[in-house]
């Protein structure tokens, strides 16, 4: 039997309830359906409680009141993958819950779409509740367990040295901005996120937070809207939707670059350099800045890979990336501590060259081709497509990958030079090896 | 041939047309004239093509066929060097065409791959040509030692990686699975052009290689291109790794290392015996994986109570790995206190072996595995990797479904009892004071 393929890869967006938008990507390419529900909110004082809420929501529901029961239900749905978490998108915090589950090629496939959506609704809107001192509360045992786990998770961020170094550099660059805060929040705020506080927060968020729903599967707009309304949307929505801050906010680099060095008992040093410019994402200057980052360190064609790694053999990896919502260029490498100064000088020299509009032809071509490939490949991955849409729509940019590609293709060395002239070093973070690596006993 | 796989010969194209039983999707398999085994899965509607060339040569191949001992880490070193040609870096060729290229080395094989949305034929040419020759200038080799040295240093700080290889060193006395895939700075130091060329000549030949391609690809065109690029004369021979006579007992009961981490990582390894023959091996691997899922999956028999007690959190994970001459189950977690966790885990394992499994647990696990398997067709990349696993195993596309059907409660219980009684070892990574 040949596989019949019908694809509608242009997303269709509809407001299906106050503050609730459905983005539909119709395709029969995949063997599973994918649905993501994202609640947008400010990234601030309630960041920790919101992160904890994510953990509590995926622990149990009214109908599946334990991890066993919920786990068993996911197993019954042919290993449906449920994931509830928080992330940050510019100056917003996102509370995201998604489900990916088979809806074809298995027995009872016709009923699985509705059953999956209903489970996702349960997870979002029917957490296990009780009352504490006459007030509604989320299940105290679950909250207590997840409070402990959350503290553990916050402390373990340092275990992944590369991620830790990047986070510390961003935290330094955006010290007085929401983006400087970790989406998982802070250890000192965990205790205050008690069962009553979390129940209030949950009720408020599901009633008033703006919601984006992404559905990737083989449904037309009418069927998808009906299915989402019937099986996923919860009734307790307010008509007054809470306003959320803009995703993007940019500013110039600080006057005197800051350098932070932390010692750690590691073998390899991690060097992260953050440059900044008041350039908004998606503008012509923003796309030129992205090109600058790509030519510098977007892949194996980039100058960092070619010069720092291949020519000088100073590192295994050296990358550069542009943080669109914040106008930040982040350069990251893992190095032998003996080479830190040399690597830092070389990276800065290459950054200045590229920012000055000196674009090695092969690197520019490599970047353009890389973007063309990524844009085309977006259609092949539901998660990648949804991630792309989520950021573009939140930034108020054209969601069409093709139009972004057109913008990239039009970037000239002069445009890169103009963007580069606004870019300056803001902060450097160096995780410095303090002692030899661990001894095996 | 599996009863669940329909195979017929498509003489015109030279392919066996195989059908995956769950989805009915077709997979094409052929032996090219030069000896390369070719697997192709056309995936209508996909924009991407993903192709991967694999040699049956990995870190466990510690000797040349003539008995020469190879330096630990040389398979991985060779992987790095294969991207360099007299004309320059192969990455540049891929980058010019917008393809994304990479490579990786495992215990048993080394794979080179690219993903592209255009100019597939040119990229495939590059992939095939790259395998045929090696450039070994001493300056490049010396530079590569610095780069790989930094890669190894990165892993030295990774508690997951260190814990895993310490566990293998504790579990195995002689088997080369205990050797770190990348070797160490010391073991790669003596690598020179001569030994790289000899390793390349021995293991990078068409009869020892597998090409898998999935996505927007045409099987006949792929096969024709292999013939055109690699020629039609059969070359080399397939490498068959000699089994290592590994004692039943473990090398050490426990191995510890301290790293800069927030709390201990504890890994338990249960040294299993591998299944015999292709079917037996697949069956045992799937049963072992099912057991780990039933016990340690989300809401699992052991996971749920340990999670509720606070002894573990969502860092608890488990897996099962098996090759022709080794097999082991692995349970890993980050914990606050190692000893109470160890006692609770071992007690729970013994209880599970004694109490047995329920039909519901087995059926639910079977569903989970079917659902996971379906995701193979959610992209060219997972599909190409699935075909590679089949090719290396010598299995058919219906192998998983067939093994899942054969995994009865009684068989799983028997396997669980054996696992719990098997020699075991611990690897503990502790926070540095």
Image (spheres, coloured by chain):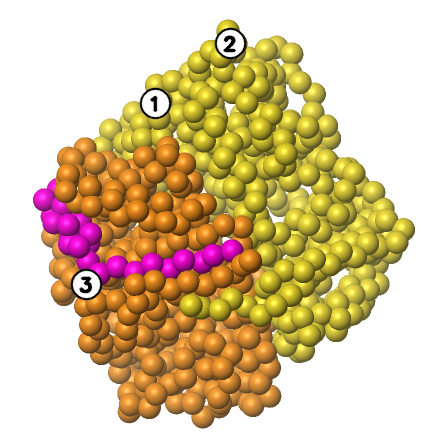
Does the segment drawn in magenta span residue A415?
no
Please name the residue that numbered disc 3 is placed on.
B274
Q: Residue at x 39, y 53 (%)?
A: B266
Which chain is home to disc 3? Answer: B
For the image, the number of numbered tags is: 3
Q: Residue at x 14, y 46 (%)?
A: B413
Q: Are marks 1 and 2 in contact (CB under 8 Å)?
A: no
**Is residue B286 or residue A341 the one in the foreground?**
A341
Chain letter, orange in picture? B
Q: Residues within 10 Å of mark 3 (few under 14, many from 20)?
A: many
Q: Residues within 10 Å of mark 1 (few under 14, many from 20)?
A: many
Does the segment drawn in magenta span residue B429?
yes
Name the disc covering residue A133, or none: 2
From where the camera sits, is residue A65 visible? Answer: yes
Position in image of residue A271 (x %, y %)? 69, 61
* Residue bounds of the magenta highlight: B408-431
Which chain is home to disc 1? Answer: A
Please name the residue that numbered disc 1 is placed on.
A64
């Amino acid at each position: 039997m040949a596989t019949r393929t019908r694809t509608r890869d242009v997303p269709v967006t509809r407001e299906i309830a106050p503050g609730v938008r459905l983005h539909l990507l119709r395709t029969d390419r995949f063997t599973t359906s994918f649905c993501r529900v994202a609640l947008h909110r400010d990234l601030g004082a309630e960041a920790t409680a919101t992160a904890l809420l994510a953990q509590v929501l995926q622990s149990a529901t009214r109908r599946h009141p334990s991890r066993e029961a919920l786990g068993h239900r996911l197993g019954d749905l042919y290993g449906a993958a449920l994931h509830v978490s928080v992330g940050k998108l510019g100056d917003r915090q996102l509370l995201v819950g998604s489900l990916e589950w088979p809806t074809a090629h298995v027995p009872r496939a016709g009923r699985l779409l509705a059953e999956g959506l209903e489970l996702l609704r349960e997870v979002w809107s029917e957490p296990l509740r009780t009352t504490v001192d006459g007030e509604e509360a989320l299940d105290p045992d679950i909250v207590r367990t997840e409070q402990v786990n959350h503290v553990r998770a916050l402390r373990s961020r340092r275990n992944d040295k590369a991620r830790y170094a990047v986070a510390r550099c961003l935290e330094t660059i955006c010290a007085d901005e929401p983006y400087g805060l970790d989406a998982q929040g802070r250890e000192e705020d965990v205790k205050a996120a008690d069962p009553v506080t979390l129940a209030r927060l949950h009720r408020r968020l599901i009633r008033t937070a703006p919601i984006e729903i992404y559905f990737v599967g083989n449904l037309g707009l009418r069927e998808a809207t009906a299915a989402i309304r019937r099986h996923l949307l919860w009734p307790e929505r307010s008509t007054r939707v809470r306003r959320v801050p803009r995703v993007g906010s940019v500013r110039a680099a600080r006057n005197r670059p800051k350098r932070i060095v932390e010692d750690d008992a590691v073998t390899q040093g991690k060097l992260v350099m953050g440059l900044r410019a008041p350039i908004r994402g998606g503008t012509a200057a923003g796309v030129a800045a992205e090109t600058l980052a790509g030519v510098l360190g977007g892949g194996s064609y980039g100058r960092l890979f070619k010069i720092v790694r291949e020519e000088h053999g100073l590192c295994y990896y050296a990358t550069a990336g542009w943080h669109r919502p914040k106008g930040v260029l982040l350069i990251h490498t893992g190095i032998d501590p003996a080479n830190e100064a040399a690597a830092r000088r070389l990276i800065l020299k290459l950054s200045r060259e590229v920012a000055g509009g000196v674009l090695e032809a092969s690197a520019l071509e490599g970047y353009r081709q890389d973007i063309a490939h990524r844009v085309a490949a977006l259609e092949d991955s539901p998660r990648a497509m949804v991630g792309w849409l989520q950021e573009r729509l939140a930034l108020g940019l054209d969601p069409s990958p093709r139009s972004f590609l057109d913008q990239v293709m039009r970037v000239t060395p002069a445009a890169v030079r103009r963007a580069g002239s606004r870019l300056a070093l803001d902060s450097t973070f160096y995780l410095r090896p303090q002692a030899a690596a661990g001894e095996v006993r | 041939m599996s009863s669940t796989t329909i195979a017929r010969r498509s003489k015109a194209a030279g392919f066996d047309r195989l059908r995956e039983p769950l989805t009915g999707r077709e997979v094409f398999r052929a032996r090219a004239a030069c000896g390369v085994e070719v697997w192709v899965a056309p995936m209508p509607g996909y924009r991407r093509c993903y192709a991967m060339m694999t040699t049956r040569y990995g870190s466990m191949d510690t000797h040349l066929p003539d008995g020469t001992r190879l330096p630990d880490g040389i398979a991985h070193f060779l992987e790095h060097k294969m991207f360099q040609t007299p004309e320059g870096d192969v990455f540049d060729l891929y980058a010019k065409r917008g393809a994304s290229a990479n490579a990786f080395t495992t215990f048993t094989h080394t794979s080179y791959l690219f993903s592209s949305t255009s100019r597939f034929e040119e990229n495939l040419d590059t992939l095939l040509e790259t395998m045929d020759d090696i450039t070994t200038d001493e300056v490049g080799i010396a530079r590569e030692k610095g780069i790989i040295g930094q890669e190894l240093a990165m892993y030295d700080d990774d508690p997951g990686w260190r814990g895993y290889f310490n566990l293998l060193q504790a579990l195995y006395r002689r088997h080369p699975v205990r050797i770190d895939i990348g070797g160490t700075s010391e073991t790669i130091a003596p690598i020179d052009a001569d030994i790289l060329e000899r390793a390349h000549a021995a293991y990078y030949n068409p009869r020892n290689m597998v090409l898998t391609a999935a996505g927007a690809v045409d099987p006949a065109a792929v096969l024709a291109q292999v013939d055109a690029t690699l020629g039609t004369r059969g070359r080399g021979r397939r490498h068959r790794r000699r089994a290592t006579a590994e004692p039943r007992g473990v090398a050490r009961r426990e191995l510890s290392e301290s790293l800069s981490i927030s709390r201990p990582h504890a890994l338990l390894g249960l040294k299993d015996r591998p299944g015999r023959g292709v079917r037996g091996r697949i069956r045992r691997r799937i049963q072992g994986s099912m057991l780990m899922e039933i016990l340690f999956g989300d809401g699992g028999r052991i996971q749920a109570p340990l999670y509720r007690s606070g002894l573990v959190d969502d860092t608890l994970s488990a897996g099962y790995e098996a090759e022709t001459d080794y097999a082991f189950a692995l349970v890993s977690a980050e914990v606050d206190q190692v000893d109470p966790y160890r006692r609770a885990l071992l007690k729970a394992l013994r209880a599970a072996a004694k109490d047995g499994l329920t039909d519901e647990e087995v059926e639910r696990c079977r569903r989970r595995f079917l659902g996971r398997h379906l995701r193979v067709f959610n992209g060219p990349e997972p599909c190409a990797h699935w075909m590679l696993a089949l090719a290396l195993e010598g299995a058919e596309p219906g192998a998983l479904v067939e093994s899942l059907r054969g995994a009865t409660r009684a068989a799983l219980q028997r396997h669980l009892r054996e696992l719990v009684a098997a020699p075991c070892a611990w690897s503990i990574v502790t926070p540095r004071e």
